[in-house]
Amino acid sequence: MCGIVGYVGERNAAPILMKGLEKLEYRGYDSAGIAVHDGKNVNIYKAKGRLKVLEERYPPSEVAGVLGIGHTRWATHGEPSELNSHPHVSGRIAVVHNGIIENYQRLKPWLEEKGFNFISETDTEVAAHLVNHFYEGNLLRALKKAVALLEGSFALGVLSADYPDTLVAVRKASPLIVGIGDNENFIASDIPAILEHTRKVYLLDDGDMVVLKKNDVRLYNSLGERIRKEIFHVTWDADMAEKGGWAHFMVKEINETPKVLHDTLLPRIDENGRFSLSEISGFAAMAGGLRRLFIIGCGTAYNAAMMGKYFIERTARIPVEVDYASEFRYRKPLIGRGDACIVISQSGETADTLAAMREAKKRGARVVAITNVVGSSVAREADEVFYTWAGPEIAVASTKAYSAQLMALFIIGTELAFRVGGIDEEQYSAMLSALIKIPEQVQRVLDNVARIQQVAAERFNAKNVFYIGRGMDCPLSMESALKLKEICYTHAEAFAAGELKHGPLALLERGTLVVSLMTEEALIDKTISNMIECRTRSAYILGIAMEGNIKAVETSDECIMIPRTMDCFAPMLAAVAAQLFAYYVAVQKGLDVDKPRNLAKSVTVE
Ligand code: M6R
């Protein structure tokens, strides 16, 4: 979780490092630091708190040097403090690290015996001392030896005071890319950090090491052998990773949903007007004989997976098991040959998801990734990839990527259903036509923002919020509640509406806000009974329903209307309304919407 960046070139390193860290702050933001080589020495600048504290304390324009590394931290080992923040120094070596060194407690006494003095509580300091221990003037050799002893996940950027022109780095199970510029080169945890300077990158594989000078990039494998790689050309531009006039990334990203859905859907419709699963042809070929389908993810991706289950079981009649990746990886799952597993991850770097995916592969299942990041670990390790073309998602709370995940699942599910005879030609065409209309219908939800803003302004003080729904509104409730928890710090729970009377009703009191999702019109009467049970106990009911649903309007205190579509696709519209509601509640509360407390965007540690 943490973001690292490095620069070597002819320009002043500090402003480039700080700018890069700004783009990586979504990965962690409890402290930050940089190390800059001024030609003689490596100077360290660190501060607890957001990056702006560091920038204010050490204005980047006043820091001299054309080589440096930087770090923005999400604390794992040791509280957020200046001492625990990176870079960590040992002798002439400075190190930034993203990931977790799992065997640091074993290495620490061994290094102490050798005379190294530990001053922080971090696992990273072990890496700094280890490189120093093996350092005899050759930085790459020292790094290689250190890496051989380190267990866990890490991307490391390393400088030596002896080399004012050289930066070395390594990647193992934590993301790291190399940016190639003119007379300058970069490393970073993620592309947005360097996009302002170059769109040419190398995507490092596990174990890869790199030695960077301003005019030279040398890549090595874990054995220390020189390797060559294709340059990856980034197609999106820096603007997509900027706020572009919006108050927050989150609201910008929600407003990008129509485009994202359009981009995810249209390339999958072939010249005959049918869905094409050519990217995942191996999986598609299994359709007829598929024993079982597993869908795995964490957080929002899990909630999308759950939606996929409802949809695929309903239309294709194939049994679908959904799991939290963190559970799947350890529960000895009954998955094997003849099964397929869809792994969902926006970042493609979530540690639990990666481990779960490896488990599924090891047991013989065919693995398809639905991910947003080209070249991510999940994308590279899956048998086949179905990309969500959502562009960079910076806000910690996932919005447009979730919508794109739903679209991906609906495309795959509809095609699967047709292939196995779960739906006929007429139903297939109707579903395809309905999906084509969704982007424009999402735009109409966005155009209704004033109404949502108003309800948020009236209700933002609610202490407890229930999200209820039946059928596909049930996983939608889970995702909607997660948004409110994450960015509003409001206690929000999702309940299958029918479950309320089996316990949760006891929690209901005057003023409890109940958000009732009512896109499953076949079940509307049942949900309405549950709403009435809540109203008679003095709850305030906010409904979200399709236009023309009079019963929903009558039973709610306030009802947000979304355009009419097939029930099974309506969650894509209702999700956007729920995301906007959470966003405006957080704004009303004056919270840091894009960087909620205690969270980070990519959870690359267990
Ligand atoms: O990158 P991933 O999709 O694998 O991330 C999974 C979760 O960490 C993520 O969805 C998280 O729950 C978001 N903060 C939700 O908004």
Image (spheres, grey):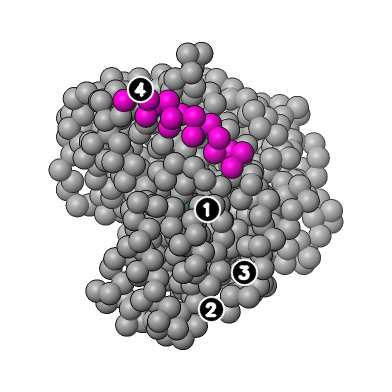
Query: Could you give the CA–CA distance between mark 3 and mark 2, rounded to whole angstroms?
Result: 12 Å
Residue at image location 37% in from the left, 25% down from the top: 426
Residue linked to disc 1 = 548
Q: What residue type is labelled 3?
A: Val
User: Does 473 sit above or below residue 138?
Assistant: below
Q: Are marks 1 and 3 in contact (CB under 8 Å)?
A: no
- Classify 10 Å Cα crowding around label 1: few (below 14), some (14-19), many (20 and above): few
Residue linked to disc 2 = 462
Q: Is residue 284 magenta?
A: no
Counting from the top left corner in percent of width and height, residue 156 is at 52, 46
Give the number of the disc on residue 425.
4
Judged from the image, the secondary structure of the residue bearing numbered disc 4 is helix
Would residue 175 be seen by someone viewing this image from the given angle? no
- Classify 10 Å Cα crowding around label 2: few (below 14), some (14-19), many (20 and above): some
Judged from the image, the secondary structure of the residue bearing numbered disc 1 is loop
Please state if 165 lies on the left or on the right of 141 as rendered: right
Earlier-in-chain disc, 3 versus 4: 4
Q: Which amino acid does label 1 sit on?
A: Gly
Task: Nearest to the eye among marks 1 and 3: give it.
Answer: 1
Q: What residue type is labelled 4?
A: Glu
Query: Could you give the CA–CA distance between mark 1 and mark 3, rounded to whole angstroms?
Result: 20 Å
Which residue, as the protein is rendered here, is positioned at the far top?
Answer: 271
